[in-house]
Image (cartoon, rainbow, N blue to C red):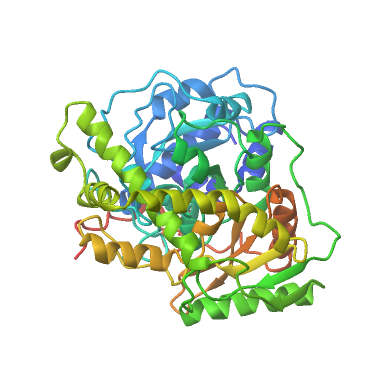
Amino acid sequence: MTGTLTTAEAMAIGRLDAHDQAALVRAGELSAAELVEAAILRVEALDPRLHSVSWRAFDQARAKAAGPLPDRPLAGVPYLLKDSLDYPGMPSRAGSASRPAAPVSRGFPYVGRLDAEGLVPVGKSAMPEFGLLGVTEPRIAPPTRNPWSPAHSPGGSSGGAGAALAAGLVPLAHGSDGAGSIRIPASCCGLVGLKPGRGATVRVRARHVVEDLLVGDSLMSRTVRDTAWGFAATHPDRPPPVTGPARRRLRVAVVLPTLRGAMPDPVLLEAVTHAADLCERLGHRVERRAWPFDGPAVDEAERTLWCHVGADCVDAVRAAGGDPEELLEPWTNALGRLAGALPPEALERAYGQLSGLPARLAAFFREQDVILSPTLAGPPPELGFMAPDVPADLLMERMFGWLGYTPLQNVAGTPAITLPLHRAADGLPVGVMFAGDRGAEDLLLGLAHELEAAQPWRDRWPPVSVASAWASRLPAWPDPVP
C-alpha cells in the first residue's frame, strides 16, 4: 500500500487486530507512520458518533511513528491511553474538571514498558470522573456511547477504551480496573478484558494505598492473543505470552448468584449456561458451586473502600484551594460525604476482607481451577441510568447491584477475564467471566484461547464500526441524549 491512505483503506486496516496490523509493518506493506495515520483517520471518521477519545495526540503520535522505533513484535501499533494514565506530553484529567488540561512531564514504568515495545499512543480515552462510576458520562464531555446501540452505555470506567476498541478505532487500549472497570466495558462492548492479579504488572501510577490494593491494569483488545501479549509485556518478570490453549482439562465451578445473593438478569443466566455447556463439550469438568466466603461482606468492603477513594479526590481538590462543590461531580462529592459518615470499624472490616479473603479463595482453588460467573448482573444500561447526578443512595444501589460479581477480584487481588461469548436478543453483548487464584493469569488466558477458537468472535462488529461500509459518512448523534 503506497501513497496517501484513503478512509476506506484505513477502515480495512482497522478490522485487523494488533498482531495482524504489526505484521503489515514487518512485511513492508505499510510503514508505522501509515499504520498510525490510519488510526487517526478512523478516529476522525467514527469518534464524533461515540465520544470515546477525550484527548487527540495526533501530532505527537505522528512524530513517534516517524521513528526510530524499537525492533519489537508490535512496534508501530497505535493504541489509546486511559485519561487517568500519566504519559509525557498529554494531560491527565481523569474525566474531571478539577484537573488541568496541561500536559504532564513524566509517566511510570507501565507506560515505559509500552514505549519500549514500540506502541504509539494516538490519544486518551474517555472515562467518568476519577473512574468512580461504571458508566462513562462525565460532565466535562458528552457521554460515551456504545457502538452497538447509541442509547446504551459502553460501561466504565474504561468506557472510552471499550467503545473505541469495539468500533475498531484502535486495536489496543489501556484499561484500569478497581471494581470491574476493565471487565465492565469489555462485557458491554463485546471485548476481551483481563483484570490481572495484584502485583502482576509494573507500577502504573503514583503510590496510593487503596488504589494499589484494588486496581489492576491491562491492555484491552478484541482478541485473546493481543490481550495475552499486553499482559506479558507489562508483567514484572516479562514472561513469554500465552499463545494458545493448554492441554490440561480444568475444574470449572459455576456460581450464579451475585455477591449479595441476588440472581442476575435472565440473559446472563443464559450466557453462563451457554458457556458452561461449551466448556463441558471441550472436556472440562463443570459443576455448580456456592461462594466459599461471606459474599455480602466482600461487597460491603468494596463499597467502603470506594467511598474512601472518592473522599480522597474531594480532599485533594480542597487541599489545592478549590471548591469541591464547584469542581467535582455530585457523585464524587457524595462519596466523600458517605466516607465521612462511616464508623471507624467499617474501614477495619474492609481491610479484614483484604487480608483474609486470599487464603479462603486459595483453599477453594485447591479443589477448583476457575470460577465461571456472569461478568455483570444485567445487560448494558441505557445512558442516564447511572449518571453522576442520580441521587447518591439510588446510584450506589444501581451501580453495585449491577457490579454484583467483579469486585471480588479487586478485594482479593486475584485475576479474572471476561469473554464475549453471548449476546442478548437485542444484539447487545453480555460477557461471561472466568476467575482464578493469584497467579492464574496464564491459565485463564489459555482457556480463553480455547474458547475463542471454539466460538470465534473477532468478526462480530457493531453497527458503528470499521465494518460499516458507510462509516466515513455517518453524522454525529445529537447530544444531549433525549
Name of the residue lying farthest toward the right = 247
Residue 2 in which image quadrant: top right
Q: Position of residue 228 (x, y in %)?
A: 67, 46
Query: Horizontal placement of 59 versus 251: left or right?
Result: left
* The C terminus sits in image quarter: bottom left
The residue positioned 43% from the left and 64% from the top of the image is 463
Residue 443 in which image quadrant: bottom right
Relative height, residue 202 to residue 130 (above, below) = above
* The N terminus sits in image quarter: top right
Considering depth in this image, is 4 or 228 the residue closer to the camera?
Answer: 228
Q: Position of residue 258 (x, y in %)?
A: 50, 71
Q: Position of residue 65 (x, y in %)?
A: 53, 25
Relative height, residue 176 to residue 258 (above, below) = above
Query: Horizontal placement of 267 versus 137: left or right?
Result: right
Considering depth in this image, is 432 or 160 the residue closer to the camera?
Answer: 432
Relative height, residue 207 to residue 424 (above, below) = above
Query: Horizontal placement of 140 versus 3: left or right?
Result: left
The residue positioned 53% from the left and 54% from the top of the image is 353
The residue positioned 69% from the left and 62% from the top of the image is 452
Is residue 173 visible in the rendered structure shown here? no
Q: Position of residue 108 (x, y in %)?
A: 51, 25
Considering depth in this image, is 426 or 253 the residue closer to the camera?
Answer: 253
